[in-house]
Image: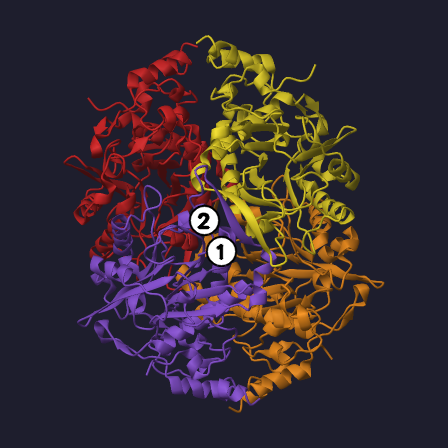
Chain colours: A purple, B orange, C yellow, D red
């Protein structure tokens, strides 16, 4: 029996997802993971996204947004300047960004995937230093190669996997989460997918479908008990948004901004310690980066006045990806024996029920 | 009997407001309004904020953030470059920004309030062209003078007043709204206040205290009925955040960013047509702009690691200011006989009650 | 006999200009001026640029850059967010931005030129408060209408005209200047044109064709004599770059950035008091803003790897436009009887000759 | 006999340098190098800057600016968000950024130098893939440790050293260069120092002291001969600006921007392929990052109106640092036997003399 996802629990999310309710619903996108769980202290990993799959190295239009830049997204300067994402994206822990970045370069060399004469890989991170011995540098080159070479389309895993292995979200176990939205044909029929690495938030903030869940589920919240209540939020959220809508780079930056609103819907204030950095890319317009011998290409584009459904989809898929990460994650004991519980499904349903927000009830209303 | 505010209805907002639950809880800040309601078509006005009151022209540290820049905030370039807000802020309708800006200059000349050899006033706007004949340019110089000279501290009005006179929010009557948060002493004891001009959102998005209110209150929503459902969100939100916490300009930009999250908590996706532009200023550190004869000054500053409570206060006061604007606003018939209803208090309470989110109930839970 | 331009004096600029060596070499672009010289104190005006001429209201792709944001460019938030310049650009003095902005709206209403349901005109400024009684608000609505309605293609005037009427540049009389570059066919054959309103710089900084002119021509420098030497640079540079190359908004922001380098080549350090704000637009891709009924359009685009010649053209045309403004400007006596001399052509040639940089000599080298 | 520096050749730079004419003139700043020259193909290395020396881990205020973001500066998101540079800066080749970044983390762990619970090191790069086998990943962890532990104050080396080992500038051999300016006491007496890794520019652009040197010295320009003339500029400039002036983060961003103008003075147009990314930090205000137990600190600050001399110093020291890198660099043969010549001192003097810009002549003028 597969693990339930957030929708399966009856959480009433808005909008219609694609077939896998995953970033991979955007045609061409593949995702790979390497999970590093070793001994008592290694609880980490790496995730990768190939915008056009691992065989097609044609750059995609992209844009980034740092809501709270207490984090790293290498390569963001060129994405913003040139409007291009020229290779796979890596997601890992804060102290392993370098090895993931350089190994992506090595992979690109081997796969003849470098678009310019050099490459500036996009690697983002969140800090897993509570469950993982982050100073132990447990992500190795082979993990990055493995994630890059094992990427798949279709259904992808969530929770304690890849870059999300050791992450903590609203003081429950966090990790990787994904979701998508498929727009109706009259709104363009485009797909928007999100992959999020979720590692942020204080329990008392946790909001699901508008319900102040965190004000009821106060147990097993190691960072806000007693005097710690006032401690800053030390986490981070990385969200990668993919779409097949033909958006230009400046419009993709606008999509990336909307991830902030999806984050807000789960309760976060974007704490000082949180590196909330987002990137959106479009798989439309193949060949645009190079153009013909004179550098000219012919593009499809979408007017700003038709972009609102894509904004909504980005907000909603980010929100659901975050909750999905928590629903999928499982209890973990890690570095220094810290134990982090997963979101208790039944208790969550009880709280939603208390507020008449569990879907079984809504149907009867 | 004074008009009820959102809290009076039992909406369960988080955090503790200051004594007036208004931007004027930040010591020194004054707010003035001029409301222009004339004949069948003029439904507009202007609001002003004096950061240190109308007599003290000492600049304040400030920062801005455009979540969705389909709007205007004149003067933002210098706020961002120089870190200084050097005079009063004006809020009006989109097509009257110019007259407000130039009249603020005239007022500054008369009041010997120009800090540099020129002045670059901050004037922001939202579009009231549905209820107001925006192309009629009904805001005149005398309205601006009146708002500037009548500014007060203490309790301030909300709803159909000043720049908010003709605004529409989630397809109910919108307008001016304000709120504040007073931090506990152990978190610094600082005050954060917000003044918002609210003119955005589609009804189906409207969320209050996490409750999907707009999915129940579908009547009197002129822009999303029938085929219009898919029409873009044409509104805008301007939020001005004041604080007495000694934040530096780059930190105030961070506060301004948090207004986006407050907006998200009311349901908006930040539509393409929405000019969602925010500014935060600090009344701390008088004299810092000029310094001594060598330009040197001594400042108080707050570390990033103590800024989270100010982030939360900014999010929460923005959220509440938006709902306050709607609770205070009253039905209006305007240009071309368009009628916009105000948020029906009792029906709202019914919906909140349905989700066990009305405060009377919470206490019994 | 027409006034000589900078090239006519033998200043050795790089690159090949278009037929008029003006922004109007970009097909479709028209420029209009209204000059306000009245009594002893009014020395000001307004200039306008219609990106596609005054009859065609189709938006153009655009991007902005504030090198030093001590200035105003209204409308920049939407240009940056939406990538569109939706109407004419106005250039005037600092304290008249409002009247120019609102009057452009009135003009757009009359000419049915508003693209969205509101309009956010782009109006930029430099401060002419030394020669002009800037606090007298001498730019009136009729001047703006006049500039808008009188715009022409072809050769345009420079110096003490339009928004440049009362401007001062490197302590010589400044004003409006223009220049263009026409790329060879093998580099795409595109045209880049610049219109600059020049009001910045200290004399000792003045550099022309690399020659430290300001270190020789020290007379008639009212702001840097004696103790004033250390006074800050209070001016500003506004540069508008037009091109027919099919650049996307994020690429046009890159072009706008290059105006900084053109400015640097004339010696400026970008002083604190200088509002150095730039905008670039492309007349390519008509109809892209609207698209078809589904918002879709087909665009031409140019790869980043073919953009260098456009960068060079932007730098060089900005540099030459600045020097052109000074070469064309004439002595002016203004407000409070301040007299500002124009750049003395023969003395300038002497200095260039001293450094073997006058073109007559170069040919013999 | 020490190698001559640019001033020693008689190039007439403006302004007065500090005692070492180096970034290390800013008290506390130390610089370390590791140079990797091995076999036929390894021509690379790493440079590091400790803002307060290698023993003092107190963060400094900082700001960044990407003039042309075709490059990497990890950690920039946090510098811009938080205003703090929390550790040493690394400079290396494009494909070695990761190893330098992660090794800086390891060094910080060992030296108990991590300010937050994680660290986001600043590592910037330029591409040395012409002289160096950049895909060979020749920078190893031990090189980074060596650079970090060997950093010194006082005179520092320039040219083919550290991160600059294999760099090419205006098609001459480039590399590391440094310069400083010491302001007169009446302008504050502050010091500004620059360290630049120089790897950009086409020969025909090369400008020294305003003289179009590159139009005369056309030999040994491997990238612009014949048909290559139109090839894009593939280089990059990284400039790090240090000062002891008490500037706030938003002001340091302004300083960083001025590096663009220094770059422009050497002739560059900021080509598409060039990653021109700058960072400025201030060693003033020790302890400000942490504050007292309530996060409060007392800062010194400088008004914007006194910042112009620091802007000039940043421009001029960047310009001179670039030329210094070329004057110090020596001929190199590298990967695939490519030979790059160094700037020929005597020929350069001849060209400057031709334009009466060699300093020996100026004195007689």
User: Is residue D16 at all visible to an observer of this figure?
Assistant: no
Asked if labels 1 and 2 touch by Cβ distance under 8 angstroms, the answer is yes
Can you tell which quarter of the image residue D235 is in?
A: top left
**B105 up-or-down from C178: above or below:** below
Q: What element carries label 2?
A: loop
**D219 up-or-down from A214: above or below:** above
Of D272 and B93, the residue lying toward us: D272
Which residue is disc 2 drawn over?
Answer: A83
Position of residue B46 in the picture relative to residue B192 (left or right):
right
For marks 2 and 1, the one nearer the N-term is 2
**B105 up-or-down from B318: above or below:** above
How far across and down, in percent of the image, does residue A125 sit? Answer: 34, 60
Question: Which residue occupies the extreme bottom position in the image?
Answer: B364
Can you tell which quarter of the image residue D43 is in?
A: top left
Question: Which residue occupies the extreme left position in the image?
Answer: D39
Question: Which residue occupies the extreme top position in the image?
Answer: C364
Q: Residue at x 39, y 78 (%)?
A: A5
Q: Residue at x 16, y 47 (%)?
A: D142
Report the number of discs. Answer: 2
How far across and down, in percent of the image, does residue D283 sit? Answer: 35, 45
- State which chain disc 2 sits on: A
Q: Is mark 1 on a helix, strand or loop?
A: helix
- State which chain disc 1 sits on: A
How far across and down, in percent of the image, does residue D38 sit? Answer: 15, 37
Are discs 2 and 1 both within one chain?
A: yes
Of B260 and D299, the residue lying toward us: B260
Q: Dividing the image into 4 quarters, which one contains the C terminus of chain A?
A: bottom right
Q: Dividing the image into 4 quarters, which one contains the N terminus of chain A?
A: bottom left
How far across and down, in percent of the image, does residue B309 sit? Answer: 46, 68
Q: Dot 2 surroundings within 10 Å: few (below 14), some, or many (20 or more)?
A: many
Which residue is disc 1 drawn over?
Answer: A252
């Amino acid at each position: 029996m597969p693990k339930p996802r957030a929708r399966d629990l009856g959480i009433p999310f808005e909008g219609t997802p694609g077939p896998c309710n995953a970033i991979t619903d955007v045609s061409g996108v593949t995702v790979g993971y390497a999970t590093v769980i070793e001994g008592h202290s290694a609880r980490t990993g790496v995730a990768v996204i190939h915008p056009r799959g691992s065989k097609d190295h044609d750059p995609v239009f992209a844009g980034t947004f740092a809501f709270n830049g207490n984090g790293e997204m290498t390569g963001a300067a060129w994405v913003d300047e040139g409007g291009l994402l020229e290779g796979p994206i890596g997601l890992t822990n804060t102290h392993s960004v370098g090895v993931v970045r350089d190994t992506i370069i090595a992979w690109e060399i081997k796969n003849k995937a470098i678009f310019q004469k050099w490459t500036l890989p996009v690697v983002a991170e969140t800090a897993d230093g509570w469950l993982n011995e982050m100073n132990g540098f447990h992500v190795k080159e082979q993990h990055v190669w493995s994630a890059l070479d094992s990427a798949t389309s279709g259904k992808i895993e969530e929770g304690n996997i890849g870059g999300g292995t050791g992450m903590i979200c609203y003081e429950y176990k966090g990790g990787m989460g994904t979701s998508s939205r498929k727009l109706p044909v009259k709104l363009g029929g485009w797909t928007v997918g999100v992959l999020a690495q979720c590692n942020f938030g204080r329990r008392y903030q946790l909001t699901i479908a508008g319900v102040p869940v965190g004000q009821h589920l106060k147990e097993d919240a190691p960072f806000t008990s007693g005097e710690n209540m006032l401690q800053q939020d030390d986490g981070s959220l990385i969200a990668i948004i993919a779409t097949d809508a033909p958006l230009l780079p400046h419009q993709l930056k606008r999509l990336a901004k909307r991830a902030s609103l999806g984050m807000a819907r789960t309760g976060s204030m974007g704490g000082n310690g949180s590196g909330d950095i987002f990137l959106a890319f479009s798989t439309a317009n193949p060949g645009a980066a190079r153009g013909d011998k004179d550098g000219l290409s012919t593009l499809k584009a979408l007017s700003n006045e038709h972009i609102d459904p894509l904004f909504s989809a980005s907000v909603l898929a980010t929100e659901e990806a975050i909750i999905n990460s928590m629903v999928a994650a499982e209890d973990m004991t890690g570095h220094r024996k810290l134990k982090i519980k997963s979101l208790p499904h039944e208790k969550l349903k009880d709280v939603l029920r208390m507020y008449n927000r569990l879907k079984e009830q809504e149907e009867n209303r």
